[in-house]
Amino acid sequence: MHSTSTIFGGRLFAPGLDGVGVPATGQWRQGRLVVCVQDGVAEREWLAPEQPTLSAGGFNAAQLSVAWPAEGGQVQFFVDAGAARTAFAATMPATLAQPHGAAQRAARGVERRFTLWWAALAAVALLPVLALALLVLRGGDVVDWAVRQIPHAQEARLGDLVLAQTRAQMRVIDSGPAVDAVKHLGERLTPGTLHRYRWLVVDKPEMNAFAAPGGVVVVYSGLLKGTDTPEEAAGVIAHEVAHAELRHGLQGMVKSMGLRAGAAVLLGDWSGAVPSEASTSLLEMKFSREAETEADMEGLRRLVAAKINPEGMARFMDKLAAQSKDATPPALLSTHPASSERAAALRALAAQHPGPWEPLPLDWAAVKASLP
């Protein structure tokens, strides 16, 4: 080229050239765009018409496309972004100002969309980090929210899994005075419940009991034998009912296994591994001291509402606290931490409710004698 006008770089696509384009330079000569490609020692030139088609081009519209028809196809020159675009605009004829402005506006629109797209992609990539931070900073609130999303009907399905696992691993006592007594006490403690309760007595000597989500309450024969009155047994059952009503099992499951466990139950994913893993963990659930205290308070409230003397609950906790001084504490304490302070707190609360109380219509000696 012999002209001294401003030269700007870009890439040229034209018939007869490499399909991926070749580096080229452009400049304005007498109001016409001339694009040059170095071909060995010689130059080849393409002359654009006075009104070529201008548009935003390139992957993110950062380049300017100048196109015109030619023999054998179309010529398209992509002006590089930055200084090359500035030089193109500074020396182009005024007749191209309008299409050039439209191309710039289109490029800005694409740039905004790309910015939003990258922001959305970054947000998606950060979701696991944000979820983890939320669980660390506001774990209790997140777990409570997740549990509230799970309908009681789905929770009952999880209880069915625990029930099946209990029957597979333990010898269940299906009928008799002990089963009738536990059911009688449980039904008095759960008026208006949203759960469909299943009351089980299992033939195991440990002093233990547990509740699973959806209204499954399992009482060990050893615990019934260890009580002196039906009011003591009612205190234990009230505590376990409180765990079920307050959905502590679901909360513990979500905390220990993550939100995927709550999602599996919510979506009814009973074929996956999560519910099975969850049902196993629920058999070995260890509640926090906060949950145990909450279950004590709610259990005592239910005893009072059912007109059952709550002193029985305090007496049984006294008994557990005394046994916990041994080298091997009662099995109930492995999942329900008890202490003399906890028993004293229950007694103080029970003292605030003077009654009157209704005697329980149960022959407790006969109940205990019926057990293996």
Image: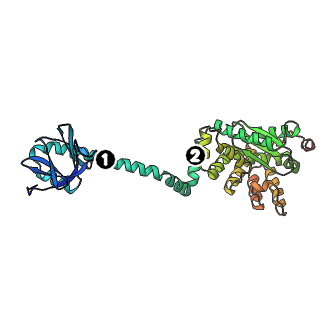
Assess disc 1: are there few (<14), some (14-19) or many (≥20) residues with their C-alpha within 10 Å of its C-alpha: few
How far across and how far down the image is residue 216, in percent?
Answer: 74, 41
Q: Which of 179 and 261 lies nearest the eye of the viewer? A: 261
Image check: 24 left or right of 214? left
Which residue is found at the position 55% from the left and 57% from the top? 136
How far across and how far down the image is residue 189, in percent?
Answer: 75, 41
Task: Give the residue at mark 2.
Answer: 146
Going from N to C along the chain, the mark reached first, 2 or 1, is 1
Image check: 184 left or right of 159? right
Q: Say which quadrant the C terminus sits in.
A: top right
How far across and how far down the image is residue 319, in percent?
Answer: 84, 56
In the image, what residue type sits under mark 1? Phe
In three-dimensional space, the C-alpha distance between marks 2 and 1, rounded to whole angstroms, equals 42 Å
- Label 1: element kind: loop
Q: Can residue 301 be seen in this view?
A: no
Query: Quadrant of the rendered structure where residue 286 is?
Result: bottom right
- Label 2: element kind: helix
Of all residues, the one furthest to the left in this rendering is: 30
Image check: 68 left or right of 258? left
Q: Which of 246 and 83 lies nearest the eye of the viewer? A: 83
How far across and how far down the image is residue 74, in percent?
Answer: 21, 39
Mark closer to the observer (2, 1): 1
Query: Quadrant of the rendered structure where residue 73 is?
Result: top left
